[in-house]
Every structure is written in structure tokens, then in C-alpha cells.
Image (cartoon, rainbow, N blue to C red):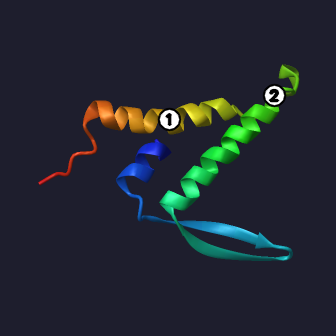
Amino acid sequence: MLGAYVILYPGARIVTLIFLGFFSRLIEIPAWVYLPVWFLMQLFSGLASLDTPAEQGGVAWFAHIGGFVAGPILLLLLGGWRRRA
């Protein structure tokens, strides 16, 4: 659904916590910048997890990727991109 969000609200600002050593800071990042970076992080983590044994468990990285990709597809199929009058 994040994929649909970035299409519908590309100018939205996402509040993000940044760690700088012992200090941290909240900053606002545009959705069109943050969400593609998030997607790439999920993709690289998913590809890296292919080498780990299944017994270790972990995060379902490819479920996150599938949800991100399903968002724009469902947006297109359900007509959610149209502006409401």
C-alpha cells in the first residue's frame, strides 16, 4: 500500500528519526524520496536473506516488497487515481 501512497501523495512529508552517534533528530522527508529508498532496502535485505537457513526465521522481506508493488496495481485496477470532484 505504500506504493499507492507515494503515487497519491508524493508531496507528503514523512517524519523520520535519524541517529547521529549518541544524538538523534526528527526530520521530514518527502514521500517520493523516502519510499523508494525504503523499497530498495527491503529488496536488498530480501536478496541477502536468501542465503540464510529457514530455521533462523526472520522478516518476510518479500511480503513487504509484494505489498509495495500491489499498491499501485490495485490503485490502477480500482480506479483510485482519479480525482474526486
Q: Position of residue 19 (x, y in %)?
A: 77, 70
Q: Nearer the viewer, residue 23 or 11?
A: 11
Question: What residue is rendered at 75% in x and 32% in y?
Answer: 47
Q: Splitting the image into 4 quarters, where does residue 18 fall?
A: bottom right
With 21 as the anchor, is 40 left or right in this view? left
Element type where label 2 sits in the image: loop
Question: What residue is rendered at 44% in x and 52% in y?
Answer: 6
Q: Position of residue 84 (x, y in %)?
A: 16, 51
Q: Nearer the viewer, residue 22 or 40?
A: 40
Figure label count: 2
The span from disc 2 to disc 1 (Cα, nearest Å) is 23 Å
Please rate how many residues cluster around mark 1, counting C-alpha atoms within 10 Å: few if below 14, some from 14 to 19, many from 20. Answer: some
> Which residue of the protein is positioned furthest toward the left in this rendering?
85
Q: Position of residue 44 (x, y in %)?
A: 73, 40
The dot on residue 49 is none
Q: Splitting the image into 4 quarters, where does residue 77 fall?
A: top left
Residue 29 vertical position relative to residue 68 in the rendered view, above or below: below
Q: In the rendered view of the protein, which quadrant contains the C terminus?
A: bottom left
With 37 as the anchor, is 3 left or right in this view? left
Which amino acid, mark 1? Val
Residue where numbered disc 2 is placed: 57
Element type where label 1 sits in the image: helix
Q: Position of residue 27 (x, y in %)?
A: 61, 74
The dot on residue 69 is 1
Question: What residue is rendered at 86% in x and 26% in y?
Answer: 51
